[in-house]
Image (tube, rainbow, N blue to C red):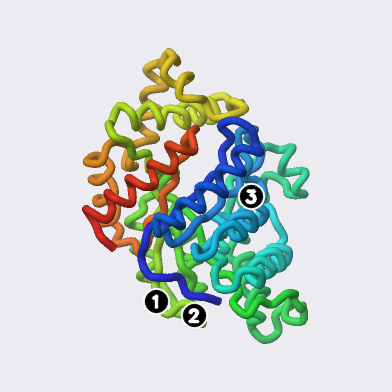
C-alpha cells in the first residue's frame, strides 16, 4: 500500500447535478483534469444515496472514469460509506482499480449517515444498524483483504482476494469525530476530517488522532487531511451568489427532506426571495469556510491550517457552474500559495 504524498492541495467532488446527470459526470472528469493541471495532489469522489441532485452514488465508477482521464493525480473515494457495502466487494473493486492505475488510487471510507428507511431496506440494512459500532471491524476486514495481512486465526484469513494489486489502494479513514480518529489511529491509517460539513471539533479530533497513532506497515507516522468548502471569487458578493446554489439546496434538504432535483442556477439564486431563516442557515453553513474574495478566503484557509497543522487541505466547491468551480480551484490555489505555502 502506498504512503500518502507530501502536503499539497487536493480536491473533493460531491458530484452534484446542476443540469443533467450526464453533464454532472462529464463536469467531474473535466474538473479533475483541470485540478491535475493546477498541481492538485488528489481528486476524490463522494458517495451519496437518495438526493435527486446527486450523481455520486457509485464512487468506484466515477473514480474509474477520472483515473482513466488523468495521468498523475491521485484518484479515489471521499469516501465509500462502508455500512452500505461488503468490505470484500470494496476490496475487489478498488484492488482492480489499483491494478489498472498503479500507485494512484486512494480508498477513503466513512461511517455513513443513515439513509431513508426504503433505501436502507434495499441495502439490506435496518436503520438501527447504521448506529452499530462495527465500523472498526469493517475497516479491519477491508485492510486485511487488500493487503492479505490477517492476524493468525482470523476467520477471513483463508479468503483469497483477486486481483491483488502490487500497490494496493491507500486506505484513509474519514470522519468528523474523535471516534473516527481513534479508528484511524489504532490501525495506523491516514485520517481525513470533513470540516466542510461544519460540525465537530477539527483541532481536537486531529490532536486525538496524533496522540493515539500506532505505526503500521503502511504508515510510520500520523498523516492528516482536512476538507474545506472553497467558493473563491473576485468579490465577496460574487462568491455569495455562487455559494447560494448549495445554500438553497441544502436548506431545503435539511428542513423538508425534499431537495430540488438539481442545484439552483445563478439566476434562481439572484431572483430568490431569501427569508431571514434561510440567510441564517447560509451564514452557519459558510462559517469557518473559504467563501469570499482573495483576502477573505485567504484568511479562512490560513486560519484552518494554523489551527490544525493538517498535512493536506482538500477543497470542495459545490457550485452550479463548472466554470465557477474551475475558477474557484484556481483562485484557492493562488491564495494558499501566497498565504500558507506548502
> Looking at the rendering, in which quadrant would you find the C terminus?
bottom left
Q: Nearer the viewer, mark 3 or mark 1?
A: 1
Taking the spot 25% from the left edge, 51% from the top edge, the residue there is 302
Pointer 2: residues within 10 angstroms few (<14), some, or many (20+)? few
Q: Is residue 150 above or below residue 295?
A: below
Q: CA distance from mark 3 to mark 1?
A: 30 Å
Residue 240 in percent (x, y) is at 35, 29
Dot 2 falls on a residue whose secondary structure is loop
* Residue 272 in view of the camera: yes
Mark 1 surroundings: few (<14), some (14-19) or many (≥20) residues within 10 A: some
Q: Give me the C-alpha separation between circle 2 and circle 3.
A: 28 Å
The reply, left or right, for residue 203 in relation to residue 278 is: left
- Residue drawn at x 36%, y 51% as measured from the top left: 201
Lower position in the chain sequence, tag 1 or tag 2 = 2
Identify the residue shown where x is 33% and y is 47%: 332
Taking the spot 69% from the left edge, 77% from the top edge, the residue there is: 164
Mark 3 and mark 1 residues within 8 Å of each other at the beta carbon = no
Q: Which residue is mark 1?
A: 221
Camera sees residue 108: no
Label 2 vs 3, first from the N-terminus: 3
Circle 2 residue: 216
For residue 130, the mark is 3
Question: For mark 3, does the 10 Å Cα neighbourhood hold few (<14), some (14 to 19), or many (20 or more) residues?
Answer: some
Question: What distance separates the C-alpha of mark 1 from that of mark 2?
Answer: 8 Å
Can you say whether 28 is above or below 253 in the image?
below
Q: Describe the element under mark 3 as helix, strand or loop.
A: helix
Foreground residue among 318 and 325 = 325
Amino acid at each position: 500500500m502506498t504512503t500518502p504524498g507530501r502536503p499539497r492541495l487536493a480536491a473533493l467532488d460531491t458530484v452534484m447535478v446542476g443540469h443533467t446527470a450526464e453533464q454532472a459526470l462529464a463536469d467531474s472528469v473535466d474538473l479533475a483534469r483541470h485540478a491535475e493541471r493546477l498541481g492538485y495532489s488528489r481528486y476524490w469522489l463522494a458517495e451519496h444515496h437518495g438526493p435527486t441532485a446527486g450523481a455520486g452514488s457509485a464512487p468506484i465508477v466515477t473514480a474509474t472514469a477520472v483515473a482513466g482521464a488523468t495521468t498523475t493525480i491521485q484518484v479515489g473515494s471521499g469516501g465509500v460509506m462502508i455500512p452500505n457495502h461488503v468490505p470484500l466487494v470494496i476490496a475487489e473493486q478498488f484492488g482492480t482499480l489499483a491494478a489498472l492505475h498503479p500507485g494512484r488510487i486512494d480508498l477513503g471510507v466513512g461511517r455513513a449517515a443513515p439513509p431513508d428507511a426504503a433505501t436502507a431496506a434495499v441495502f439490506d440494512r435496518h436503520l438501527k444498524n447504521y448506529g452499530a459500532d462495527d465500523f472498526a471491524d469493517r475497516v479491519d476486514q477491508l485492510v486485511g483483504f487488500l493487503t492479505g495481512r490477517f492476524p493468525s486465526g482470523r476467520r477471513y484469513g483463508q479468503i483469497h482476494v483477486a486481483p491483488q494489486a502490487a500497490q494496493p489502494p491507500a486506505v484513509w479513514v474519514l470522519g468528523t469525530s474523535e471516534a473516527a480518529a481513534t479508528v484511524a489511529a489504532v490501525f495506523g491509517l491516514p485520517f481525513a476530517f470533513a470540516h466542510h460539513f461544519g460540525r465537530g471539533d477539527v483541532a481536537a479530533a486531529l490532536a486525538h488522532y496524533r496522540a493515539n497513532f500506532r505505526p503500521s506497515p503502511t504508515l510510520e507516522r500520523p498523516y492528516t487531511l482536512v476538507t474545506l468548502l472553497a467558493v473563491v471569487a473576485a468579490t465577496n458578493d460574487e462568491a455569495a451568489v455562487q455559494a447560494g446554489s448549495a445554500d438553497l439546496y441544502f436548506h431545503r434538504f435539511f428542513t423538508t427532506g425534499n431537495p430540488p432535483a438539481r442545484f439552483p442556477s445563478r439566476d434562481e439564486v439572484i431572483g430568490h426571495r431569501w427569508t431571514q431563516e434561510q440567510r441564517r442557515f447560509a451564514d452557519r453553513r459558510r462559517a469557518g469556510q473559504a467563501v469570499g474574495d482573495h483576502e477573505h478566503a485567504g484568511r479562512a484557509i490560513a486560519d484552518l491550517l494554523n489551527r490544525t497543522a493538517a498535512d493536506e487541505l482538500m477543497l470542495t466547491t459545490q457550485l452550479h457552474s463548472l466554470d465557477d468551480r474551475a475558477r474557484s480551484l484556481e483562485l484557492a490555489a493562488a491564495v494558499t500559495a501566497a498565504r500558507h505555502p506548502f
